[in-house]
Image: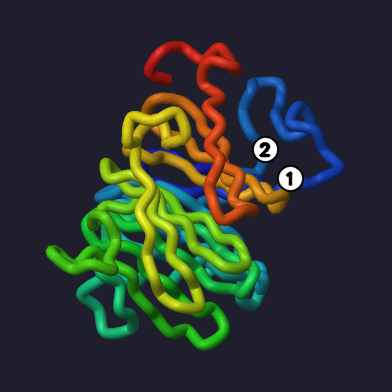
Amino acid sequence: FVATRKHLFLCSDFNSEKSVSNVINTTRKLNNLKKMPIDFSKGLITDMVEDYRGRFWISSTKGLYLLQLKNQQYEVERLLSNSLNNNLTSDYIIRLFIDRSDNLFVSTYAGGVNILDLQQKAFHHIYHVPNALNTLSEKIIRAVADDYDYLWIGTNTMGLDRLNKKTGTITHFRNDGTTNGICSNEIRALLNDNEGQLWVGHTKGLDVIDITGNTLNVHHLGEKLCLPLGE
């Protein structure tokens, strides 16, 4: 798939047995591009994931789209926060993530995290409640990662939140000025490598957190990777 400012294209010549050079012709253009039935002229594509059924979920700044192949033709369904077919809390979507239990996590701008059970098509929500004790740190969510016991949620400016799946308890991790804290509260990407480490990308570089024990051990990789200051 190739996303542009206004449209989404499928390069039908590309597969795992072909290199990129095989699908680009002599004029340096991709062969057999097919426009998908989605118009992003009023918004931008922000992310795309494939679920266990081979369907594609596409997030944008103007809602959530479901793209699936039916009778050899791609069909699209648009989900909006003000429509009756879903319970999205915001149309401005930043990231998508599917966990091992077939739940689609929708990180939104100002609407917290929307969770769609892909088997039952039921929406659940995790959001910020002002002055509440057990709540997300803020309403703008940048990234989500999953492990067996916890859901890790990266916020825009308020650090990293950890949701205990069994108890519903939310724990906050922020830059507190110590060497064992995360380097920045402005989280931009999360990745669980399934080896007990959570990779955290933020506006001051990259941290790796050992999440196997009761106490989190944070390793700062910005200087070790020779990343430019602020990258």
Taking the image as shown, residue 228 lies to the left or right of residue 49, namely left
Badge 1 crowding class, 10 Å Cα cut-off, few under 14, some 14 to 19, many 20 or more, is: few
* Residue in the image at 41% along x and 13% along y: 229
- Nearest the eye: 151 or 1: 151
Residue 5 image point, x, y percent: 37, 39
Residue 151's disc is: none
Residue 90 placement: quadrant: bottom left
Residue 62 image point, x, y percent: 28, 57
Q: Is residue 205 above or below residue 88?
A: above
Residue 77 placement: quadrant: bottom left
Identify which amino acid the numbered label 2 is placed on.
Answer: Asn
How is the protein colored in the picture?
rainbow
Q: CA distance from mark 1 to mark 2?
A: 7 Å
Q: Are marks 1 and 2 in contact (CB under 8 Å)?
A: yes
Question: Which residue lies under the disc numbered 2?
Answer: 31
Q: Is residue 124 above or below residue 138?
A: below
* Residue in the image at 47% along x and 34% along y: 180
Asked whether residue 1 is in view, the answer is no
